[in-house]
Image: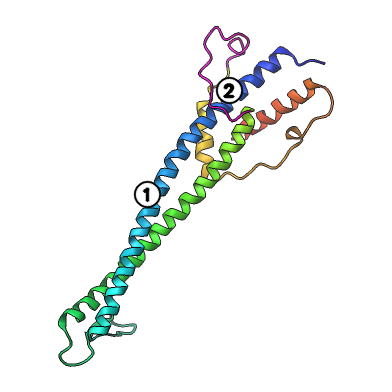
Amino acid sequence: MTAHSWETRQMERAQVAAAATVHRLELALIEMESELDFRRVELGQIIAARHARGAQALAAYAAGARVRFGGSDAANEAEPSWDGAPHGAVRTLQESINDAPRLAAEETAALGAVSDLERRVLQTQRLVAHWRAEAGSGSPPPPAPPSDRGPVACAPTVPPPEPEAAKAEAAATQWTAPEPSAAQSPAAGSGSLTIRARLAEMGHRVAGW
């Protein structure tokens, strides 16, 4: 039995909405990947600054400075290893001691930002792949259908795809791949039953949001 024209129109509209969602997610993905590049550069600069401080501290040690550990009640301080040790070496070592907590905190925050963005990029890439499958192709979203587009333009009015895309973007940090369902497997029986099962599955997903 051939598919009813109403079912065909609904499937076409669902594919158009999914393609628009893909487009919105791809734009968000470009922005996230750009920020990820920036955060990685920032993290590299912080690590380089910490390494430079470490090299300066080693040079200060070699020049005659040492650390006097304050224990649990006082902060560590730099002091000369012997009488007449260069004051510059002691001062450099003290600056290294003072900067260590700040540099460690900055590195931890930058590393956390990079890790979070990497996770969000990966999940958004999965979302894009999922909605491309729903759209039925990997092509960019078609323009909004004008009034003379034929059967699609005559379909009953449904909510525009923007809210669906916004929800998909918001779910980028929480999305996990959906479990396979009967509607996503090759269906047995007539083409009409396959389309009905597909529409029912998509309806359940939208209702679940």
**Mark in front: 2 vs 1:** 1
The image quarter containing residue 181 is top right
Q: Any magenta on residue 139?
A: yes
Would residue 192 appear left or right of 97 to someone viewing this image? right
| Mark nearer the N terminus (2 vs 1) | 2
As helix, strand or loop, the secondary structure at mark 1 comes to helix
Image check: 85 left or right of 44? left
Q: Nearer the viewer, residue 129 or 104?
A: 129
Q: Which residue is mark 1?
A: 38
- Magenta stretch contains residue 41: no
Residue labelled with disc 2: 16
Give the residue at the far top of this rendering: 148
Q: Is residue 207 visible?
A: no
Q: What residue span does the magenta drawing correspond to?
A: 137-157
The local secondary structure at tag 2 comes to helix
Q: Is residue 127 above or below residue 144?
A: below
| Residue sitting nearer the eye, 167 or 143 | 143
Does residue 87 appear left or right of residue 72 in this picture? Answer: left
What residue lies at 78% left-to-right and 32% top-to-bottom?
A: 186
Q: Do tag 2 and tag 1 residues touch (Cβ < 8 Å)?
A: no
